[in-house]
């Protein structure tokens, strides 16, 4: 039996005129979300630390998507991003915290302080900083949607990825807590838990991208394939649209059944 192939949805303009900020939006899942949001009518600001990738994507996508070089782990950089969004677009309706840092497989006690700190900075501190600088304007508007990209690693951890797993567990708990606190202001907060995907980060998790190592990962996914940027974009579009107006505090697995 061949695994089912992803289905490409047709645009329904579910995000028409919504102002969306997507971090880590120049590649991988983030790029998939950016492309889908643009198709669905959103006005985008793509934030990424990779200036070259960001510039190329911005030229390709054209006027509907602004780009902003941003280090999401740096307070001053996120301050500048928020100021740019509010000055040029006047508001923010959707924030997608997609930027993330992976790790190569290693015994938990052998990880270097430098890599550990970088995982905390990108996977945890960034969500705090984005909330610090974007939530106030959402509170004033009494509306908004925040989507945090977590991982199945925070639900069903794999060995030798302990500190990455833990960082994604933080994202899931933070999502639920944010949802409770921000609900009185009309702000919804949800998360996605992707399984390993066809993105540049896959090689990092595998240590080396070989057929044998891919086969071991695929054996744990009942639907028999890795996730794709389109898979994540479809789920992100739904949760950030008005179709999900009654959904908050959810950490939705997009994992082909891995966490069953």
Image (cartoon, rainbow, N blue to C red):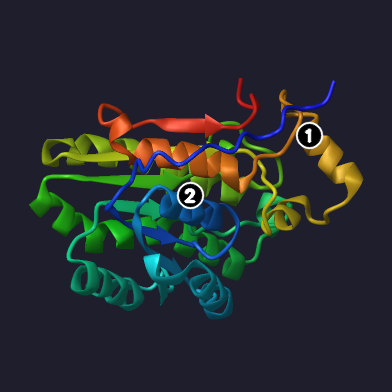
- Decide: is 56 above or below 64: below
Q: Position of residue 78 (x, y in %)?
A: 33, 71
Tell me what residue is drawn at x 15 percent, y 39 percent.
186
What element does badge 2 sit on?
helix
- Residue positioned most to the left: 140
Q: Is residue 178 left or right of residue 38?
A: left
Cα separation between marks 1 and 2:
26 Å
Q: Nearer the viewer, residue 69 or 33?
A: 33
Q: Position of residue 24 (x, y in %)?
A: 49, 62
Tell me what residue is drawn at x 31 percent, y 60 percent.
130
Q: Residues within 10 Å of mark 1 (few under 14, many from 20)?
A: some
State which mark lies toward you, 1 or 2: 2
Q: Residues within 10 Å of mark 2 (few under 14, many from 20)?
A: many
Quarter holding residue 216:
top right
Q: Which quadrant is the N terminus positioned in?
A: top right
- Say which mark, if any, is on residue 36: 2
- Say which mark, if any, is on residue 218: 1
- Decide: is 101 above or below 237: below
Q: Position of residue 51 (x, y in %)?
A: 52, 79
Q: Which quadrant is the C terminus positioned in?
A: top right
Is any part of residue 48 visible from this angle? yes
- The tag earlier along the polypeptide, 1 or 2, is 2
Is any part of residue 151 visible from this angle? no
């Amino acid at each position: 039996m061949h695994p089912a192939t992803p289905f490409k949805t047709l645009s329904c303009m579910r995000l028409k005129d919504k102002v969306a900020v997507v971090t880590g939006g120049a590649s991988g899942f983030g790029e998939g979300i950016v492309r889908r949001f643009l198709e669905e009518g959103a006005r985008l600001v793509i934030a990424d630390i990779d200036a070259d990738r960001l510039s190329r994507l911005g030229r390709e996508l054209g006027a509907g998507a602004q780009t902003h070089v941003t280090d999401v782990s740096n307070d001053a950089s996120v301050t500048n991003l928020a100021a740019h969004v509010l000055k040029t677009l006047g508001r923010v309706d959707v924030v997608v915290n997609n930027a993330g840092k992976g790790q190569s497989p290693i015994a938990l006690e052998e990880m270097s302080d430098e890599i550990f700190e970088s995982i905390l900075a990108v996977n945890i501190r960034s969500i705090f900083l984005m909330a610090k600088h974007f939530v106030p304007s959402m509170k004033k508007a009494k509306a908004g949607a925040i989507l945090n990209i977590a991982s199945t690693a925070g639900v069903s951890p794999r060995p030798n990825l302990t500190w990455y797993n833990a960082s994604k567990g933080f994202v899931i708990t933070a999502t639920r807590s944010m949802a409770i606190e921000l609900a009185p202001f009309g702000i919804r907060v949800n998360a996605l838990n992707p399984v390993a995907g066809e993105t540049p980060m896959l090689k990092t998790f595998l240590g080396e991208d070989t057929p044998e190592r891919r086969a071991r990962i695929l054996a744990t996914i009942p639907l028999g394939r890795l996730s794709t940027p389109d898979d994540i974009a479809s789920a992100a579009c739904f949760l950030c649209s008005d179709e999900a107006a009654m959904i908050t505090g959810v950490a939705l697995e997009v994992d082909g059944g891995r966490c069953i």
